[in-house]
Amino acid sequence: MTTSCVLDASALMAYLRDEPGADEVERALKTPAAMSAVNLAEVLSKFADRGREPSDLAREFAERGFLPGAVEVHAFDGAAARETARIRKETTGTGLSLGDRACLALGRALGAPVLTTDRAWARLRLGVRVRVLR
């Protein structure tokens, strides 16, 4: 199955909160989007911070009409760890978090564009297309 894009945690949160850029994420979810398990953990942590159960995310997707599989979660394995470390070396001083680099590494590995709300990513030159949602 073709992956439409890779979602950063900020992109999925924009969708779930119905913030600017949510419509573009919704379109991406119609052709399964990919996400690193690291970024999904960030989203689920935000749910937990608000006193919600992480399993509520599945219910939220169902309520919005998305079947299971709208987001293909990729494991953060040894290969992903090495690629994430390479990106750290390439982006020293940019302030990218581990989650940011995991997302970009997955986009590079899949050859898919990355959706984010972080405008600073537009300046990155890592061999992955970045689409800033707002």
Image (cartoon, rainbow, N blue to C red):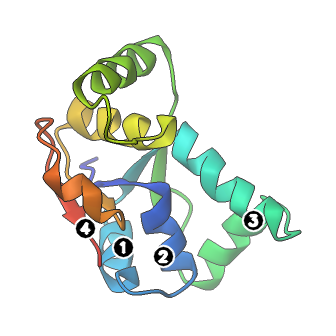
* Rendered position, 52 above or below 89: below
* Rendered position, 5 above or below 60: above
Cα separation between marks 3 and 4: 23 Å
Q: Which residue is mark 4?
A: 132
Mark in front: 1 vs 2? 2
Q: Could you tell me residue 124's position as x and y percent?
A: 17, 45
Q: Are marks 1 and 2 in contact (CB under 8 Å)?
A: yes
Q: Is residue 9 visible?
A: yes
Disc 4 marks a residue whose amino acid type is: Val
Cα separation between marks 2 and 4: 12 Å
Looking at the picture, tell me which residue is in the foreground, 40 or 118: 118
Q: Which residue is mark 1?
A: 25
Q: Residues within 10 Å of mark 2 (few under 14, many from 20)?
A: many
Q: Are marks 3 and 4 in contact (CB under 8 Å)?
A: no
Q: Which residue is mark 3?
A: 47
Q: Could you tell me residue 31's position as x and y percent?
A: 30, 64
Q: Specify the farthest residue to the front.
A: 93
Q: Residue at the location (15% across, 35% down)?
A: 126
Cα separation between marks 1 and 2: 8 Å
Q: Residue at the location (56% across, 77% down)?
A: 16
Q: Could you tell me residue 81's position as x and y percent?
A: 45, 18
Circle 4 sits in a helix, a strand or a loop, which is it? strand
Circle 3 sits in a helix, a strand or a loop, which is it? helix
Disc 3 marks a residue whose amino acid type is: Phe
Q: Are marks 3 and 1 in contact (CB under 8 Å)?
A: no
Q: Which residue is mark 2?
A: 14
Mark in front: 3 vs 4? 4
Looking at the picture, tell me which residue is in the foreground, 125 or 2: 125
* Rendered position, 59 above or below 106: below
